[in-house]
């Protein structure tokens, strides 16, 4: 086993935290401030941060994926959400940081009640969105305090041995996979700017930069992104701001006709020089951008139109995704067959499973990365929704329990994301009941037919009804958009209470209802779906959409209580399994093919 | 037939409109303005306006229930929504007003594109909410123009023969029906103000005034409201602002201990004198309030906490609603039996039906009013969702078509709202298919089981799935809250895409999916539901809610295609019909009882 794309270490530097906070307080004072806010964020609000941007972890020891700290002269507080309260307590020094609940007592509320009049609280305007900064500012103002944008982040002045910023090579994303040239995409973006009476667009989300210019990079874990910005004027040549060291001559030549390549340092100057209406992406543009543009232009915060364009996949991207899912399905079949043989022997650990699955995917010869760190939760660990196994938490997989594995791959032709829950040994009646309810929800989404214009919020309850009827539910959304060899989580639509964006044909979304019994087991069944025109519209009065399931992997029949399924649900499951067998069997070795045959038999 | 609570006349004064607009322009000029905005609204944003507040109808001739006009020196525009484009064209003078679409080119957008720099546009700050005024102001500013609040509404200066403001008598709402004394309600409101750190609450919604002080009035059609305001300080005696002429000695004595009764004129002075944080109801408080309070206090716009309290009915209100629904169900059974006998003769008109239904309800001896003007749409008129029959539109009901009747009653113990669609002659296969799909949606809501905290937006799609599957849908929400001898439409929850408020036990909501085939027929099946604790929670992990159907009236079996219903759906229908028969039969005369027996037979 040679895991390459994932680590299992706890990297907390808890022991250094106290001294670092002391140093930060001194530095803050030098800057004539009384405190400082440290979000877990980089300049582009990336989901995965480069090591050089892990300021929150450096300062506090806390390595979770979401949080913020506020350091004042006499106290320091770390805000984390419900997932991370235990981890945060373990990783931080209780003499230095108190832990607060990010949702129940958010930083804004804390500031309102804890700042005294006249306090000057510093923040780095490059690490907060405008909306985020405004919320904090409002809280400060309510307390009679002042939010002050710093010129230089005080942590950067203190951080010795700070890792160098990433310098991953940029490659051109082949038109075979992209399906549309950068020039054509940019023309469409400009048309959209015209419609929205916008003079220029600042592209601050690196996913959107990658899509618009058909480039991919290697700066961010699990996502082929380059840390780059772009400026697209309604008229004239777009500019791409990216470190020249990342580009070889071929890439430079390829970009030549579509963009002026400029140094990242030039961005500040160029933004200050803008006039007219400038669109900024509300969710990724730094507060600093608004401030720079306001010098001469009119910054307007909103949705970057690229976010929607990117989410609607073209023929090449859809064909690529289908191919990627066949390949990935074969790797997953190998894994599931292997797991079924090995797990009952009682020797496997969660890390073994993660490694084996990565190995099977690497055996395809085309794996670029995993699309996120695999969630491999056995028994009670399965109930921890965002569980990530470390050497400390690693658990031997029992011979009579559930095992939940949520994983994905980055291939050049597509990004995958799939969850299966399988049983080792015998399932209890409760497990089968819960699994069947989750499956009913999964099938309700997979078979939904809905008018054009329907949002994910409208579909979300379909996934929950069977659970609701038993007084059960799950505490996460049902689906998110997935990129094309890009981020496994992308905007703008989602299947959740908050998903108000209409689903469009060509979007790829996950379908992942679940059920979690704390300290006992977790269940999730996840496939990716493509939004398509309903193939049999049959006299419909409005354009109708439906889903095509892209993911191809058996769903554990041993966990299904057949009497709980309707005839329609059984028919769906059997025909899905038939398709899985027909597509995947030719791609796997004999032992797996035999296993697959059994695993996909009709109920 | 003696219809008392409804009229069928077209009251448009189209002919006078041109002269009135000329006069308005002159008056506006005298006030040093270039134009004026005329919303269809009174000072409390009531759904039904007193005649004295129908400024938009006076000016334009348009009598619809929603709209706004903008009059500039050289042009005038009337904004109406899709329901009213035909009616607006017929009722207004095309030489004076152009008609614009309220949703597609709203006033804000029109102002942005049509105002010239320096224009001074007047508005009456008593007739707009703060949010509404701010939106208009923003549009004016974008055009370089200015929004100016007038001291005196120019229309009021011109309107001769303006009807006197209503002076309906106020009565105390008996504790038997209210279930909680005004003193106890006010104590709860004060506790809530304390929790929200609010020093005073301005109660601007007359429904909330009525609920809090246990009073009912007679100023507004179909809703037992007094035009009154209240001011509830966190400490000290609340003030009730109501015309003294509306109160007799007994009512005055009854109010004595809970409120200072003051003249409506005193409100302005009292609001200006406030200090501290003052909560204003976002949806009903006039812009003028914010301006007055800002003199000394801190106005905060939000949700009036009474809106939620009022929506959660207590035992007495629930018992009252059940009794009202039995009484109303008997009246409706009489009507439906009568209709079934008379309609096939081919002589009934829509107005006849409206009159007969009102008569049957008045026969109960307890009818206070209808809860809204009855919608009685035969054949193609059934497809007009907000159809209201007039002498001009009145149609003879055909002997082979659908008839949709949506109506409700005000009784002291409860407010009702019910829609039935019945067939005259033979239904087509299409009608039966559509009716059965609507019924499947209705049953899906009626039988839903959902965790505490679920919003109406989450339930709404359940009502649509069966329609979606055939490419059909309906263009309105599925349900609204209903008052207790108060407004038939109340806040804060609704079953619709926009219903983000969680449903609470004790709320009463409508369940009214439909289907409309333009120029052909309309279908809607509406019952009122009470949110209850799921009676059989069966090991649920979270508190579970369900609905109890309150409305008791047969659903036309002739329109159901039994093969389209699942066993569960048939079981629901049969047991609902059994309950209707058992409850209503003892309350009706023999002929109706015999009809009811047939109408409620198992499928």
Image (cartoon, coloured by chain):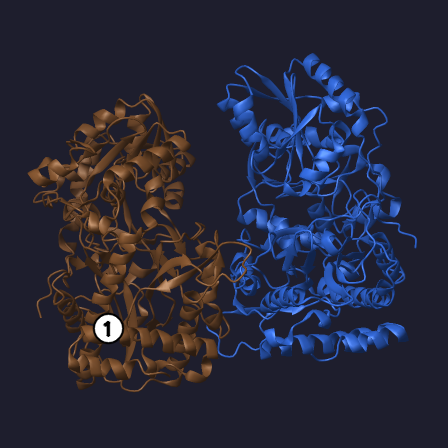
Chain colours: A blue, B brown
Q: Please name the residue shown 55% across and 30% down the image.
A: A108
Q: Position of residue B26 (x, y in %)?
A: 18, 37
In the picture, the quarter occupied by the C terminus of chain B is bottom left
Quadrant housing residue B160: top left
Q: How many marks?
A: 1
Query: Foreground: B52 or B62?
Result: B52
Q: Secondary structure at mark 1?
A: helix
Query: Residue B554: in sight, yes or no?
Result: yes
Query: Foreground: B387 or A36?
Result: A36
Quadrant housing residue B391: bottom left
Query: Above or below — where is A370 with respect to A578?
Result: above
Q: Position of residue A321 (x, y in %)?
A: 74, 63
Query: Foreground: A312 or B279?
Result: B279
Query: Residue A134: in sight, yes or no?
Result: no
- Left/right of residue A509 with respect to residue A142 in the rendered view: right
Callout 1: residue from which chain?
A: B
Q: Position of residue A390 (x, y in %)?
A: 81, 45
- Farthest residue to the right: give it: A1
- Residue density around tag 1, few if under 14, some if 14–19, many if 20 or more, within 10 Å: many
- Left/right of residue B258 with respect to residue A446 in the rendered view: left
In the picture, the quarter occupied by the N terminus of chain B is bottom left
Q: Which residue is mark 1?
A: B584
Q: Please name the residue shown 30% across and 74% down the image.
A: B421
Q: Position of residue B129 (x, y in %)?
A: 32, 39
């Amino acid at each position: 086993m040679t895991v390459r794309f994932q680590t299992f270490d706890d990297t907390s530097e808890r022991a250094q935290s106290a001294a670092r906070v002391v140093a930060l307080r001194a530095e803050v004072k030098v800057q004539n401030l009384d405190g400082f806010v440290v979000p877990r964020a980089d300049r582009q609000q990336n989901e995965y941060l480069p090591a050089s941007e892990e300021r929150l972890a450096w300062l506090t020891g806390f390595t979770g994926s979401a949080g913020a700290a506020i350091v004042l002269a006499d106290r320091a507080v770390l805000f984390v959400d419900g997932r991370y309260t235990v981890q945060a307590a373990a990783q931080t020094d209780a003499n230095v940081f108190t832990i607060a609940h990010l949702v129940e007592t958010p930083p804004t509320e804390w500031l309102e009640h804890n700042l005294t009049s006249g306090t000057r609280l510093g923040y780095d305007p490059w690490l907060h969105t405008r909306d985020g900064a405004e919320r904090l500012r409002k809280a400060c103002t309510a307390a009679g305090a002042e939010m002050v944008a710093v010129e230089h982040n005080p942590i950067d002045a203190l951080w010795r041995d700070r890792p160098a910023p990433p310098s991953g090579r940029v490659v051109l994303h082949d038109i075979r996979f992209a399906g549309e040239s950068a020039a054509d995409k940019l023309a469409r973006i400009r048309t959209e700017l015209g419609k929205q009476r916008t003079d220029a667009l600042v592209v601050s989300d690196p996913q959107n930069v990658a899509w618009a210019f058909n480039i991919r990079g290697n700066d961010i874990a699990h996502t082929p992104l380059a840390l780059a910005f772009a400026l697209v004027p309604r008229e004239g040549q777009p500019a791409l701001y990216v470190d020249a060291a990342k580009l070889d001559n071929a890439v430079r030549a390829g970009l030549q006709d579509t963009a002026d390549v400029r140094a990242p340092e030039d961005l500040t100057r160029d933004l200050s020089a803008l006039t007219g209406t400038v669109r900024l992406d509300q969710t990724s543009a730094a507060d600093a951008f608004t401030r720079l543009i306001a010098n001469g232009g009119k910054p307007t915060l909103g949705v970057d139109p690229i976010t929607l364009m990117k989410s609607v996949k073209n023929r090449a991207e859809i064909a690529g995704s289908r191919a990627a899912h066949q390949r990935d399905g074969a790797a997953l079949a190998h894994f599931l067959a292997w797991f079924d043989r090995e797990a009952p022997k009682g020797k496997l650990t969660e890390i073994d499973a993660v490694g084996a699955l990565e190995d099977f995917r690497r055996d395809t010869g085309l794996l670029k990365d995993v699309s996120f760190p695999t969630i491999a939760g056995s028994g009670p660990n399965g109930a921890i929704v965002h569980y990530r196994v470390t050497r400390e938490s690693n658990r031997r997989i029992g011979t009579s329990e559930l095992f939940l594995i949520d994983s994905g791959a980055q291939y050049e032709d597509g990004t995958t994301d799939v969850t299966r829950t399988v049983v080792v040994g015998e399932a209890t009646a409760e497990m089968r009941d819960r699994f069947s309810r989750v499956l009913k929800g999964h099938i309700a989404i997979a078979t939904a037919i809905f008018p054009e214009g329907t949002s994910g919020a409208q579909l979300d309850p379909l996934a929950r009804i069977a659970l609701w009827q038993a007084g059960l539910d799950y505490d996460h959304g049902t689906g998110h958009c997935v990129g094309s060899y890009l981020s496994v989580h992308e905007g703008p639509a989602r299947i959740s209470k908050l998903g108000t964006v209409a689903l469009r044909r060509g979007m790829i979304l996950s379908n992942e209802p679940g059920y979690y019994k704390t300290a006992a087991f977790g269940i999730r069944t996840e496939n990716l779906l493509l939004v398509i025109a309903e193939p049999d519209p049959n006299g419909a009065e409005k354009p109708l959409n439906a889903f095509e399931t892209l993911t191809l992997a058996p769903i554990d029949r041993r966990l299904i209580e057949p009497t709980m399924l309707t005839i329609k649900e059984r028919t769906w499951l059997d025909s899905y399994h038939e398709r899985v067998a027909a597509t995947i069997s030719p791609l796997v070795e004999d032992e797996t093919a035999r296993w697959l045959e059994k695993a996909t038999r009709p109920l």
